[in-house]
Image: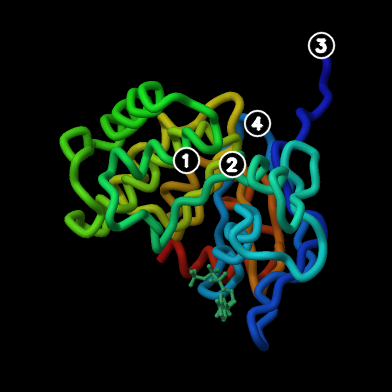
Amino acid sequence: MSTATPPALAGLHGVSKRHGLVQALQDVHLELTAGETVALVGPPGAGKTALCRVLAGLDPVDSGQILVHGHPLPRRGRQRTRLRAAVALVGEPPELLPTRTLLENLTAGQMKLRGRTLLDAERRALAELRRVGLIGYAARRPPELTGDERLRTALARALALDPAVLLLDDPPTAVRDLLPELTRADRALVVVTREAELVRSEAHRVVFMSTGRIVEEGPAHQFLSAPRTSRARDFLTRLLH
Ligand SMILES: Nc1ncnc2c1ncn2[C@@H]1O[C@H](COP(=O)(O)OP(=O)(O)OP(=O)(O)O)[C@@H](O)[C@H]1O
């Protein structure tokens, strides 16, 4: 039996990113492999959201590289659009089209990025709206929804595109409850969370960030029971009490 590690679905290689005077990410290396759920944790301002945004191609990096399916994410062009579709971020704000119905919000990307017909895209959109508990909302528009419903809509839209990597930035309870059915053998799931219980029950691996760097990473049970660095120990003490 082969013991080779499966190839990474996506990753960051030596990525640094500044926001004004703040070094949001500093020489970050991370690879995500199929089938794993990664808990991304760290104190406020650690760079968790910044990491998700550059990996999803929403913010450009200052240096280093984002790799998707082994290809560097270009700064522009069709290849960038194609590769970006493999990495979905669901976080605040959900950035839905405010004047379009939820059904239209969910079908547009599928037709453009996945080449589906309107009929196929609508079928899939309705299945995903059902999954997130919004099947009766297809004809509504985002301003008619609560914040929680908008996030669930964004999740349904992301799932309809079959992302290889799904990034959930601090998901609310309604989304957290869906986690077990979001994992797939061909997908990596990354969850930014402040909840030790979620780390314990859902994560295979923990990535702990502080001041823009990955300070520690390892199996979830090991991180929770025997963190190696003093920063991780301090963080866990606050998290658990
Ligand atoms: N658009 C921006 N403009 C200015 N500074 C930013 C911007 N985005 C992030 N930052 C700064 O970069 C650093 C990392 O922020 P980030 O939001 O990634 O942290 P985080 O770990 O997600 O924190 P939190 O848990 O509070 O959401 C912070 O110091 C933040 O103030």
Occupied quadrant, residue 125:
top left
Between disc 2 and disc 3, the foreground one is 2
- Residue 137 position, x and y percent, is 19, 40
Disc 3 crowd rating (10 Å Cα; few below 14, some 14-19, many 20+) is few
Q: Nearer the viewer, residue 117 or 106?
A: 117
Disc nearer the start of the sequence (1/4)? 4
Residue displayed at 26% across by 59% down: 147
Contact flag, marks 2 and 4 (Cβ < 8 Å): no
Residue designated by label 2: 85
Q: Nearer the viewer, residue 216 or 177?
A: 177
Contact flag, marks 4 and 3 (Cβ < 8 Å): no
Disc 4 crowd rating (10 Å Cα; few below 14, some 14-19, many 20+) is some
Contact flag, marks 1 and 4 (Cβ < 8 Å): no
Residue designated by label 3: 1
Disc 2 is placed on an element classified as loop
> Where on the image, by quarter, is ligand 1?
bottom right
Mark 3 vs mark 1, CA separation in Å: 40 Å
- Residue 173 position, x and y percent, is 30, 50
Mark 3: amino acid: Met
Mark 2 vs mark 3, CA separation in Å: 33 Å
Residue designated by label 4: 34
Quadrant occupied by the C terminus? bottom left
Q: Nearer the viewer, residue 193 or 228?
A: 193
Between disc 3 and disc 1, the foreground one is 1
* 7 horizontally vs 110: left or right: right
Residue 221 appears in the picture as rendered: no
Mark 1 vs mark 4, CA separation in Å: 23 Å
* 94 horizontally vs 98: left or right: right
Mark 2: amino acid: Ala
Quadrant occupied by the N terminus? top right
Mark 4 vs mark 3, CA separation in Å: 18 Å
Residue designated by label 1: 109
